């Protein structure tokens, strides 16, 4: 059985009854008086696309008008199948997916609880919605439960949002515990898998799926600019959620769709990253090497490619990053106010292509 998101019916039914439900339709090959391709540059493939092959660089419009096409629908079907979801909907970026999802599903009278370390795109989505919102302490299910308990008998919808792998700390959210507490209080869990896709799970499927809990989560956000090595994002969930987003998600409706070239890259990424098992194994060994090393600085606990080394003070962390860069190590400082005062840090991304010698050289400076 899939996720029960019947609360979406009310607004969808209003559109069905009013005969203004949006559905995506493919071009029927008629004479084009609909797309925004005013000079025919996309239609006639006038941009040199030798590096992408035959795919068009422009989609000519929004998905709900002229911008829908077979490859994007086919790719969405593949994404849904890969992530064991009923449906998937491609967005132009992870930022657009999070803002478009949260602002659409959470209504006035609803409430959103979000992890205190949530990415800016989640926070902006929360701000764009008309729902009330509260943060809960980072990865603290007890704090979340206390907040949910205080809302007993709440009549609106309750949403809980987290990242599965946190973008600045690299730690993993307690997804199973979050699911239990969400079920107990009738809350809908949304998980942003931006830093998990490609990396976590035997095939890079992400945290929720690697735990086998995909049917207990309302929506999952996958972004393609990180491990998949391309651009764009998708939201996986029910067919009803997809239809709802096509109708109410403003960052989906009011923007030009990704071009074929970008969607082809997403589709190819899905055929590449699941088979990179040796790379994931080496990556995991390099993460262990880094984690087990003695360092003069505080190192955040993380089993993912995102590693944080705390160097308090903006000028101190900048100075150390410069030293590393002068010694051929490209490490960037993360300064206050992006992170709390005293938690300024080097944010280190470990890759499958980093050698043992390179990681050891980096450790030597820390
Ligand atoms: C957790 C998280 N979600 C969403 C995004 C946004 O994704 P995109 O870069 O595709 O807009 C990021 C990117 O930094 C991220 O770290």
Image (cartoon, rainbow, N blue to C red):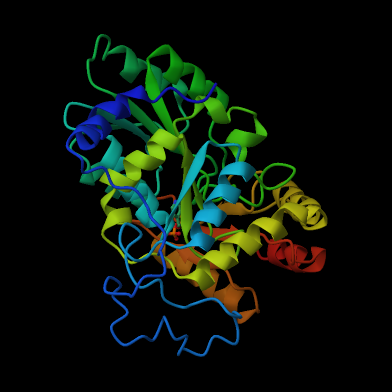
Instruction: Identify which residue is drawn at 22% across, 37% down.
Output: 15
Would you place residue 60 above or below residue 28 in this image? below
Which quarter of the rendering shows the N terminus? top right
Would you place residue 184 above or below residue 79 in this image? above
Answer with the quarter of the image where residue 68 lies: bottom left
Does 12 sit left or right of 221 as displayed?
A: left
Between 29 and 158, the one nearer to me in the picture: 29
Which quarter of the rendering shows the C terminus? bottom right
Answer with the quarter of the image where residue 161 lies: top left
Give coordinates of residue 69: x percent, y percent.
45, 63
Instruction: Identify which residue is drawn at 28% across, 75% down.
Output: 36
Is residue 297 something one can see in this rendering?
no
Is residue 334 something one can see in this rendering?
yes
Ligand 1 resides in the quarter of the picture at: bottom left
Would you place residue 332 above or below residue 90 in this image? below
Instruction: Identify which residue is drawn at 31% across, 88% down.
Output: 39
Q: Identify the residue at the far top of this view.
A: 153
Would you place residue 57 above or below residue 252 in this image? below
Does 290 sit left or right of 106 as displayed?
A: right
Give coordinates of residue 291: x percent, y percent.
70, 48
Q: Identify the residue at the far front of this view.
A: 30
Give coordinates of residue 25: x percent, y percent.
38, 55
């Amino acid at each position: 059985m899939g996720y029960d998101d019947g609360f979406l019916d009310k607004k969808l039914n209003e559109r069905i009854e009013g005969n203004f439900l949006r559905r995506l339709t493919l071009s029927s090959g008629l004479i084009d008086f609909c797309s925004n391709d005013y000079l025919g540059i996309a239609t006639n493939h006038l941009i040199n696309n030798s590096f992408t092959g035959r795919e068009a660089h422009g989609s000519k419009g929004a998905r709900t008008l002229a911008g829908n096409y077979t490859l994007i629908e086919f790719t969405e079907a593949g994404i849904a199948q890969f992530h064991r979801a009923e449906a998937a909907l491609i967005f132009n970026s992870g930022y657009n997916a999070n803002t478009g999802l949260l602002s659409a599903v959470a209504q006035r009278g609803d409430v959103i609880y979000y992890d205190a370390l949530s990415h800016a795109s989640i926070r902006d989505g929360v701000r764009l919605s008309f729902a009330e919102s509260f943060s809960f302490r980072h990865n603290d299910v007890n704090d979340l439960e206390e907040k949910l308990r205080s809302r007993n008998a709440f009549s609106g919808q309750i949403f809980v949002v987290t990242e599965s792998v946190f973008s600045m700390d690299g730690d993993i959210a307690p997804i199973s515990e979050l699911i239990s507490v969400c079920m107990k209080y009738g809350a809908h869990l949304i998980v942003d898998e931006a830093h998990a896709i490609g990396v976590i799970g035997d095939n890079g499927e992400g945290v929720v799926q690697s735990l086998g809990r995909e049917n207990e989560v309302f929506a999952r956000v996958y972004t393609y600019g990180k491990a998949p090595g391309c651009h764009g994002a998708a939201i996986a969930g029910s067919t009803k959620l997809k239809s709802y987003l096509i109708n109410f998600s403003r960052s989906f409706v009011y923007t030009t769709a990704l071009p074929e070239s970008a969607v082809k890259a997403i589709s190819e990424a899905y055929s590449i990253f699941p088979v990179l098992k040796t790379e994931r194994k080496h990556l995991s060994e390099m993460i262990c090497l880094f984690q087990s090393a003695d360092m003069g600085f505080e190192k955040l606990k993380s089993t993912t490619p995102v590693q944080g080394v705390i160097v308090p003070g903006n000028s101190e962390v900048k100075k150390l990053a410069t030293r590393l860069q002068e010694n051929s190590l490209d490490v960037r400082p993360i300064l206050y106010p992006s992170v709390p005062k005293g938690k300024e840090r080097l944010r280190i991304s470990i890759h499958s292509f980093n050698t043992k010698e390179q990681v050891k050289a980096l450790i030597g400076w820390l």
